[in-house]
């Protein structure tokens, strides 16, 4: 799967949009659909470009952009960052469990 076209300019645009629209703190999360409309970009079911930009903002630019079931937001404080980190850990454990189950299935089909 190809990575979406998400350059530094696009990442800055996302961050500025979150700030401008007051997407600061979990209670002010903004859906990717609304962000796509505000940024005047193509609206898709997953808004992959926005999600990838969020990851770049965190991993490359060290911006506390996180998400929850209500959308994306700039973490207001340490607690919101820790809450998002815990959510990632729970998802990671679920993925690991699925991988182990698939390994068992593959092993059973070898026999």
Image (cartoon, helix red, strand yellow):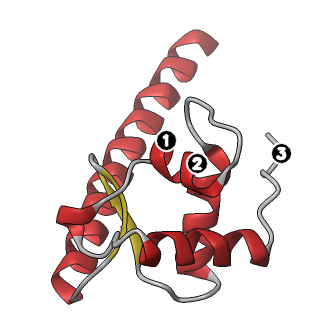
The residue that appears at 49% across and 41% down in the rendered structure is 33
Going 55% across and 78% down the picture, which residue do you hit?
Answer: 16
12 vs 105, nearest the viewer: 12
Q: Are marks 3 and 1 in contact (CB under 8 Å)?
A: no
Q: Is residue 3 above or below residue 18?
A: above
Quadrant for residue 25, please give it: bottom left
Residue that appears at 70% across and 47% down: 41
Does residue 111 appear anywhere in the picture? no
Residue corresponding to mark 3 = 2
Task: Report the Cα–Cα distance between label 3 and label 1.
Answer: 21 Å
Dot 2, how many residues are within 10 Å of its Cα: few (below 14), some (14-19), or many (20+)? some
The C terminus lies in which quarter of the figure?
Answer: top right
Residue 61 drawn at (x, y percent): 61, 88
- Horizontal relation, residue 37 to residue 97: left or right: right
Marks 3/2: CA–CA distance: 20 Å
Residue 54 seen anywhere in this rendered image of the structure: yes
CB of mark 1 within 8 Å of CB of mark 2?
Answer: yes
Residue behind mark 2: 36
Q: Identify the image quadrant of residue 15.
A: bottom right
Q: Position of residue 68 (x, y in %)?
A: 29, 54
Q: CA distance from mark 1 to mark 2?
A: 5 Å
Q: Residue at x 59, y 68 (%)?
A: 14
Q: Which mark is residue 107?
A: none
Above or below 66: residue 75: below
For discs 3 and 1, the disc positioned in front in the rendered view? 1
Residue 33's disc number? 1
């Amino acid at each position: 799967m190809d990575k979406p076209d998400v350059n530094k300019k696009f990442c800055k645009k996302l961050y500025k949009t979150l700030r401008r629209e007051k997407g600061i703190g979990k209670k002010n999360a903004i859906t990717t659909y609304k962000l796509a409309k505000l940024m005047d970009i193509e609206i898709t079911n997953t808004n992959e470009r926005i999600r990838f930009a969020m990851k770049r903002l965190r991993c490359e630019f060290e911006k506390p952009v996180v998400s929850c079931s209500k959308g994306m937001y700039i973490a207001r404080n340490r607690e919101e960052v820790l809450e998002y980190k815990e959510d990632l850990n729970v998802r990671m454990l679920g993925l690991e469990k699925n991988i182990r189950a698939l390994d068992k299935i593959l092993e059973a089909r070898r026999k």
